[in-house]
Image: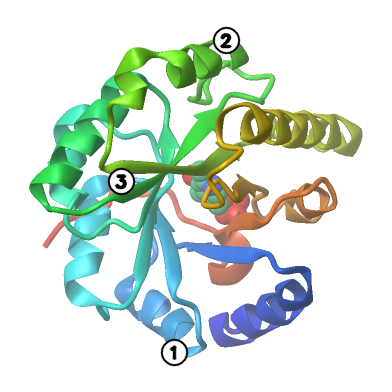
Amino acid sequence: MSITANIEEIHNELKPLGVTLVAISKTKPIEDIQEAYDAGQRIFGENLVQEMVDKYEKLPKDIEWHLVGHLQTNKVKYIAAFISMIESVDSIKLLKEINKHALKNNRIIDCLLQVHIADEDTKFGLDHVELIELLESQEFTELENIRIRGLMGIATNTDNEKFIKEEFYELKVLFDGIKVSYFRKEESFDTLSMGMSSDYKIAIEQGSNMIRLGSTLFGKRVIKHFKAK
Ligand SMILES: *Cc1c(COP(=O)(O)O)cnc(C)c1O
């Protein structure tokens, strides 16, 4: 199936559910992203700063770019002017750096806090204790140029659906608890980003309202190193 057909099919599937699609275009060429754009997709996600900046420069300016990969503090400055959402915030140090560059650009940057839910060491993210510590820290309350929109999580890479379901269920419970405890008055805390190509249906059943699809839309990724122009 073509990218256009894939986008249309997923849009039709998600529309009645009120779930937002982030098209994960990492490693994919400009032409593929343009095709998805022409099919109506506007939110795209990348995991590398350099690759995102390069694509940002070449593609329509009404694209909303989401960063979904681990972000080093020294790279925030390259995306601060245009980034729509940073989904992978995993420390107060990073959040302070985002705040600093958001202020310089005279804007507020939307962020998700990434929670470690997978049964794997390789995935980044805050555990529950670190998440609460961050939210309760004095430093956090002083940040005026970031807006926490919700949580993001990546489930374990396994065929065991029951296992994945439990991880997503726990993240939804955590999301609801954090909302009540820390963001009761903030309607903008409304986003739970969970679900990728292999597990997005389970994620939606468990309460996700933002999914991040790469291979389902664009086909399998060939692992390669992206070359900037
Ligand atoms: C690559 C990636 C995705 C998309 O993965 P697919 O399995 O291709 O859908 C989603 N989220 C994050 C954080 C990713 O790095």
Numbered disc 2: secondary structure: helix
Q: What's the CA distance linking mark 1 and mark 3?
A: 23 Å
Q: What's the CA distance linking mark 2 and mark 3?
A: 28 Å
Going from N to C along the chain, the mark reached first, 1 or 3, is 1
> Where in the figure is residue 12, as x and y percent of width and height?
73, 82
Amino acid at pointer 2: Val
Q: Quadrant of residue 38?
A: bottom left
Of residues 41 and 28, the one drawn nearer to the viewer in this rendering: 41
Name the residue rendered at 59%, 50% in the picture.
191
Amino acid at pointer 3: Leu
Q: What's the CA distance linking mark 1 and mark 2?
A: 43 Å
Name the residue rendered at 28%, 31% in the picture.
143
Q: Residue furthest bottom?
A: 38
Q: Which residue is mark 1?
A: 38
Q: Which residue is mark 2?
A: 129
Amino acid at pointer 1: Asp
Name the disc covering residue 48, or none: 3
> Where in the figure is residue 112, as x and y percent of width and height?
47, 41
Numbered disc 1: secondary structure: helix
- Mark 3: C-beta under 8 Å from nearest atom of ligand 1: no
* 2 and 3 marks in contact (CB < 8 Å): no
Image height of 217 relative to 125, above or below: below
Q: Residue furthest front?
A: 185
Of residues 34 and 178, the one drawn nearer to the viewer in this rendering: 178
Of residues 127 and 217, the one drawn nearer to the viewer in this rendering: 127
Image height of 30 relative to 101, above or below: below
Image height of 17 relative to 117, above or below: below
